[in-house]
Amino acid sequence: MNRTSSSHSRPRPQSQRSASFAPALRRRSTAASIRSFGADAEDVETEATSTEHAIVEEIAEIKRYEDFTTIDWVQDATRERLRRKAKRRDRATWGRGGEGGMGLRGRKGGWKAGKWRRKVVEAYDAGQAWIVVTIVGVAIGMNAAMLNIITEWLGDIKLGHCETAFYLNENFCCWGAESGCPEWKRWSGFWPVDYTLYILFGAFFSLTAAALVKLYAPYAAGSGISEMKCIIAGFVMKGFLGAWTLVIKSIGLPLAIASGLSVGKEGPSVHYAVCTGNVVSRFFDKYRRNASKTREILSASAAAGVAVAFGSPIGGVLFSLEEMSNYFPLKTLWRSYFCALVATAVLAAMNPFRTGQLVMFQVKYDRDWHFFEILFYIIIGVFGGLYGAFVMKWNLKMQVFRKKYLSQYPITEAVTLAVLTAIVCYPNMFLRIDMTESMEILFLECEGGHDYDELCDVDNRWHMIFSLAIATILRTLLVIISFGCKVPAGIFVPSMAVGASFGRMVGIFVQYIHESFPDSAFFSACDPDGPCITPGTYAFLGAGAALSGIMHITVSVVVIMFEITGALTYILPTMIVVGVTKAVSERFGHGGIADRMIYLNGYPFLDNKEEHTFGVPVSQVMATHVVSIPATGLELRQLEKIMTENTFQGFPIVEDINSKTLLGYVGRTELRYAIDRAKRDQMAPGHAKCYFNSTVTDPRTPSSSMPSVSFDTMSATSAQLSVDLSKFMDPTPLSVHPRLPLETVMELFKKMGPRVILIEYRGRLTGLVTVKDCLKYQFKVEAHDNLGSASAVDGREEKLWGVIKTVGSWVGGLSGELGRRVGAGGRHEGRLDHQTTSRSAATERERRRDDGDESDVELEDRGTSGIR
């Protein structure tokens, strides 16, 4: 290429050959002229591409998607292709600039230096994604290790302290001892004092976590799985993955776990992992300016979050594929795998438990199972499906009640739940300790000296069955009322703890049957000289069944449970249990708790797992009154008036208002940028005519008509100005026929991810449709089917709220009376609490108004007025 350009720069000597060579000379001359013409055309095209890329980069720099809107995957993909095209052209022309005035040696040296610089830039651009996922994986692994250490210490500090070193938890204080040590001391030898301190510690931890969430990062509450599914699918929730949310989630999560609430850290682990990916990717222009590219990093971060939560890198990748991501190409699969690998390696290197285990409940099984146990595995699978259906049904009712009555009292609710949980859980040996520690105990085999409060004692068997049954029932009820309170809270581990307690109960019962009837033909496969039934494996399978039942995931659960145990022989029992759980769960509805929460909150999310049969064309759903812009003749001030009076994110371009012949589509950000640049750079007056159909079609073809004045050529003193806006218009928007089925249009939204689909009939614009329009129709159909029971539910909620207010008033009066009697200044504290509650309620209402009104206004604009 350099030689060709050099030959073009030097004048060709005139030939003195005979006429016999004329045809050959003419062919060479023609070829040279064609090459010269092609080079000129290529230069023009390169310049046009560079100009277009510069404009796109400027728009990307200022463009920010509005809160509670969806991104345009098609537009972002086009922008990414244009960026790559400009990069390739820059690389092709690199090193050619300074050759004219240099000698041969200088040209070679400059060319080599440019070549190496080009290679370095190419390598950085190609490896930018791997750099990001490496940094993200390291940060996630370090954060997970620190949170594991802090959570264990806070959980043990409620029961006692280490005399030798206060900062050590019970395991490190009594390192090497099986059941306690003299260095670990209870707070008191008198159990009522220990009971009271246990309750006070739980209340203090929950108070701190809820206050941090309310004051600094409201989005840090809850699990975040449902919101992250929507964000990865293209929904925009500003602040949900921000730095403050990451900090408060990381601080509040150990406090919420240590408070004793029936919440887990696995779901929030995914949230802070995705927050880490979002914060890190903001430092790289490639991801900061392209929302769809950022979603690839978020998918990889979600996989790393599950990997460090369960010590399961492959399971994390499959979880991200099965549950989190709608769009999961092969490159995202590899990056998710690498990010999960790095995060798990960092966690293993830090070794927070000093046992080589990545999670506390990691166990090893070396005993095989028997085919007669499949009957009991099916029972466990049925329990998992029933548990998931029961918890989802009543937890969603609790969420509706919480939004309606408890949204102004998040701190009071969290403290009340923590106190109630502590009062109920302390007497039970399996509810008193942390859930991960409880699962570790329930997963263990009885052989090898492992025992916890006579769990493996044959004489104490029925007492253990009764305690495990009580733990299963109480934990289920506590999960229903606790998941969703305004602290960092997950549902993975609480569900696994419920399943583990039920599974261990079944395992102990099966062991009792075998020991009572050892010669039965049913147990003929057992070895008479050794143990036959391993109750710990039943607990392990019960945990997997409950997790699958609450989340409606299958493959990732099997791989996660396999990586936790490392028992290859138990893959088939796990698959049987999860398969039965899935079959039972589907009988009670589609979608796990995250999908139900998306539906409850009304997020614009089209689930790939759902199949609809509406039987209506898209014309029944589309908006028919559309604000469109004529391609010619509109003045600049009229264009500004249209943008001021309408808040829509884009406008169709038509040939004229009467014919409505569709020409293209222009986004609001691009149009705003074009108007501001015309007014700023060229001082275009308000009466300047705006054109979206440029008359210049090809730079190589001369045109007899006068072209429209562009930003670079128009004169500020011209009397009749015409501003060319054609370069900001998308001439090929996605459009469909009005009679296309609505189900097909929804598939287009799922597969391609456009922000809007235009409806045209024989070239004429008839309407447009968005994701929210489709979902509004779906909600309307489903609400019509469930219209009967709404009033009865409202009546029951009112009665329950009346009971809660009565009990709260009684408790408040009793506390005030006790405070006055002991001289604690109850009046002053009550006034301070009232002021704090009022200020917190006002802050919450303001936040909800700021966060929710944009979405409501947009839905009202598209639903009630129908004008665009």
Image (cartoon, rainbow, N blue to C red):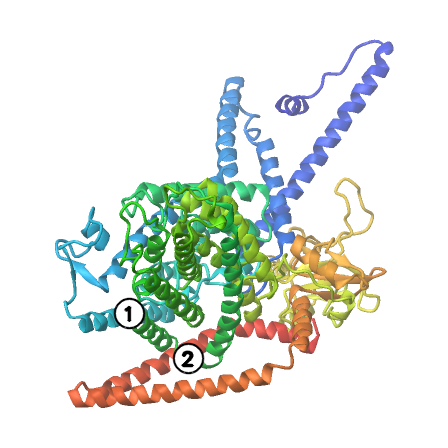
Residue 599 in which image quadrant? bottom right
Frontmost residue, 81 versus 239: 239
Residue 370 sits above or below residue 619 on the image: above
Which residue lies most toward the front here? 519
Q: Which mark is residue 408?
A: 2
Neighbour tally class for label 1: few under 14, some 14-19, many 20 plus, Cα within 10 Å = few
The answer to whether residue 456 of the structure is visible from this angle is: yes
Residue 250 in which image quadrant? bottom left
Residue 501 sits above or below residue 301 on the image: below
For image coordinates 68% across by 24% down, the residue present is: 8
Is 790 left, or right, of 391 in this rendering?
A: right
SS category of the residue bearing label 1 = loop
SS category of the residue bearing label 2 = loop
For image coordinates 50% across by 44% down, the residue present is: 571
Q: Position of residue 352 (x, y in %)?
A: 29, 47
Q: Looking at numbered disc 1 in the image, what kind of residue is underneath it?
A: Pro
Q: Which badge, 1 or 2, comes first in the chain's sequence?
A: 2
The answer to whether residue 317 of the structure is visible from this angle is: no
Residue 190 sits above or below residue 31 on the image: below
The residue at which mark 1 appears reads as 427
Q: Position of residue 580 (x, y in %)?
A: 56, 55
Q: Position of residue 722 (x, y in %)?
A: 72, 59
Q: Quadrant of the N terminus?
A: top right
Residue 478 sits above or below residue 26 on the image: below
Q: Looking at numbered disc 2 in the image, what kind of residue is underneath it?
A: Gln
